[in-house]
Image (spheres, rainbow, N blue to C red):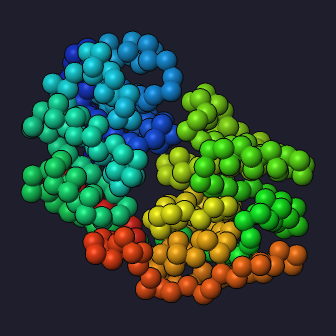
C-alpha cells in the first residue's frame, strides 16, 4: 500500500463513481482489515478509501461511490453487483491488486475475477499476492499480467513464527469432551477453534456451553453484523473462545492470539499453514493444537509432508483412542495429485507478481 499511496499523493480531481486503485480480497473480514490499514497509512494524505462487501445494505456504499474513491477494497461478488447497477466505472483505474489470490481461487471466484479483469483498462499496473504457487495461481498471474515479474519473498530466520505445534489423536465422538478438558485443565486463556462445517460449529458452541464454557461461532451463514460483533468481542478479549469455519483462516489479524485449535483437520495442507499463522505473530510465541482421528490420517500425512517434519504427539489421560492413528508418511501424495502434482514449494513467505 505504501508505494500506491506515494504514487497517488498528488493533487488530482477524481470524478464521481470512479476509482484509482482496486484491491480484491476473498473475504469480507479481509476487506475490512485491509481498508483499515489503508485508512491508517493515509491519515495525513488527501486520499479516500472504502471497503465494499456483501451481506450488508448496498445503499450506503452506492452513496459513498458517488463522490469517487481513490482506493477501493472489495470482494468480487459485491463489486460486480455495483458494476451491473452502474454505481461504479473503471475508466480512471490505475492499479489492480489481487490479494490472497490462492484463496480466491479456492473459493471459486475465478469467473468473477475474469469478468472484472475484462472490464478494466489495459493500461494499468497489476499486482498479485499469493502465499502458494499452484499452477492455477500461475495461470491467473499470466492472465492478469503480460510478462509479469515474479518476486518470491523468503522468511528471515530471525522472524520465523514461534509456534509450538502438537497434536492429540482422539476418537471423533470424544472431541468436544477433550476440548473442554484442555480448556479447564490447562487453563487456556483464549483459543481460535477451527471446524469444517457450519452446523458443527453451532453444535460445538452448544456443547461447550453445557460444560460452562462460553463460546461463539463465526461462519458464512451468519450476518455481517453478527460476524463483526463476534470478532470485535474476541479481539477485545471479552470473548475467550471463538469457533470458526475456514472463513476466518486468512485475513483475521488478532493481536497476541495465544492459541489456535484444529478441532477438524483441514483437507488442504495450505489451509493448515494459514490457520496456525493466526498465532505467533510479530515476534510473539503461540501454540497450535490439532485433534486427529483415524479418518484424518491421509490429511495428516499431507500436512506433515508440507511442513517437512512430524508434528509432536501428546497423550491425554482418559482420552485413549480405539482406532490408533499410524505414524505419518512424509512423502505421502494423495492419489488425485499423483498424476498432476502441483509445483508448490514449502511456504517460506509471500509470492508476488506484478509489473
Does residue 101 sit above or below 71 in this rendering?
Answer: below
Residue drawn at the location 20% of the way across and 63% of the way down: 150
Residue drawn at the location 38% of the way across and 15% of the way down: 62
Q: Nearer the viewer, residue 119 or 135?
A: 135
Residue 249 position, x and y percent, is: 53, 53
Dividing the picture into quadrants, the one containing residue 130 is bottom left
Dividing the picture into quadrants, the one containing residue 332 is bottom left
Say whether residue 347 is left or right of residue 231.
Answer: left
Say whether residue 137 is left or right of residue 106.
Answer: left
Residue drawn at the location 32% of the way across and 12% of the way down: 66
Does residue 247 sit above or below 102 in this rendering?
Answer: above
Does residue 24 sit above or below 185 in this rendering?
Answer: above
Residue 223, visible in the rendered structure: yes
Q: Nearer the viewer, residue 121 or 325?
A: 325
Q: Nearer the viewer, residue 339 or 318?
A: 339
Does residue 187 sit above or below 232 in this rendering?
Answer: below
Residue 286, visible in the rendered structure: no
Residue 281 position, x and y percent, is: 56, 61
Residue 140 position, x and y percent, is: 22, 52
Residue drawn at the location 74% of the way across and 70% of the way down: 171
Residue 290 position, x and y percent, is: 65, 69
- Labels in figure, total: 0
Dividing the picture into quadrants, the one containing residue 314 is bottom right
Say whether residue 215 is left or right of residue 104.
Answer: right
Q: Nearer the viewer, residue 34 or 217?
A: 217
Look at the image and tell me in which quarter the N terminus lies.
Answer: top left
Amino acid at each position: 500500500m505504501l508505494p500506491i499511496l506515494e504514487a497517488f499523493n498528488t493533487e488530482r480531481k477524481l470524478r464521481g463513481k470512479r476509482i484509482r486503485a482496486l484491491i480484491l480480497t476473498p473475504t469480507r473480514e479481509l476487506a475490512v482489515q485491509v481498508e483499515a490499514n489503508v485508512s491508517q497509512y493515509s491519515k495525513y494524505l488527501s486520499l479516500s478509501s472504502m471497503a465494499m462487501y456483501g451481506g450488508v445494505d448496498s445503499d450506503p456504499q452506492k452513496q459513498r461511490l458517488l463522490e469517487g474513491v481513490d482506493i477501493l477494497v472489495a470482494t468480487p461478488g459485491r463489486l460486480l453487483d455495483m458494476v451491473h447497477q452502474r454505481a461504479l466505472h473503471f475508466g480512471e483505474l490505475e492499479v489492480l491488486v489481487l490479494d490472497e489470490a490462492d484463496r480466491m481461487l479456492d473459493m471459486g471466484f475465478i469467473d468473477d475475477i475474469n469478468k472484472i479483469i475484462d472490464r478494466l483498462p489495459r493500461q494499468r499496473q497489476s499486482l498479485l499476492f499469493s502465499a502458494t504457487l499452484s499452477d492455477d495461481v500461475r495461470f491467473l498471474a499470466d492472465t492478469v499480467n503480460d510478462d509479469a515479474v515474479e518476486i518470491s519473498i523468503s522468511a528471515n530466520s530471525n522472524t520465523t513464527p514461534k509456534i509450538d505445534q502438537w497434536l492429540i489423536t482422539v476418537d471423533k465422538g470424544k472431541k468436544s469432551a477433550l476440548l473442554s478438558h484442555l480448556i479447564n485443565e490447562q487453563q487456556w486463556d483464549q483459543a481460535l477453534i477451527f471446524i469444517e462445517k457450519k452446523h458443527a460449529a453451532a453444535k460445538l458452541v452448544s456443547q461447550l456451553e453445557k460444560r460452562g464454557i462460553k463460546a461463539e461461532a463465526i461462519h458464512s451463514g451468519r450476518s455481517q453484523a453478527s460476524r463483526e460483533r463476534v470478532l470485535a468481542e474476541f479481539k477485545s478479549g471479552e470473548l475467550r473462545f471463538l469457533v470458526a469455519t475456514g472463513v476466518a483462516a486468512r485475513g483475521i489479524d488478532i493481536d497476541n492470539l495465544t492459541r489456535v485449535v484444529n478441532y477438524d483437520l483441514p483437507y488442504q495442507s495450505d489451509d493448515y499453514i494459514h490457520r496456525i499463522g493466526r498465532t505467533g505473530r510479530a515476534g510473539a510465541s503461540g501454540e497450535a493444537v490439532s485433534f486427529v482421528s483415524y479418518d484424518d490420517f491421509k490429511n495428516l500425512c499431507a500436512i506433515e509432508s508440507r511442513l517437512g517434519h512430524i508434528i509432536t504427539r501428546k497423550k491425554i489421560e482418559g482420552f485413549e483412542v480405539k482406532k490408533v492413528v499410524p505414524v505419518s508418511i512424509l512423502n505421502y501424495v494423495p492419489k488425485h495429485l499423483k498424476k498432476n502434482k502441483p509445483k508448490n514449494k514449502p511456504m517460506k513467505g509471500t509470492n508476488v507478481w506484478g509489473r
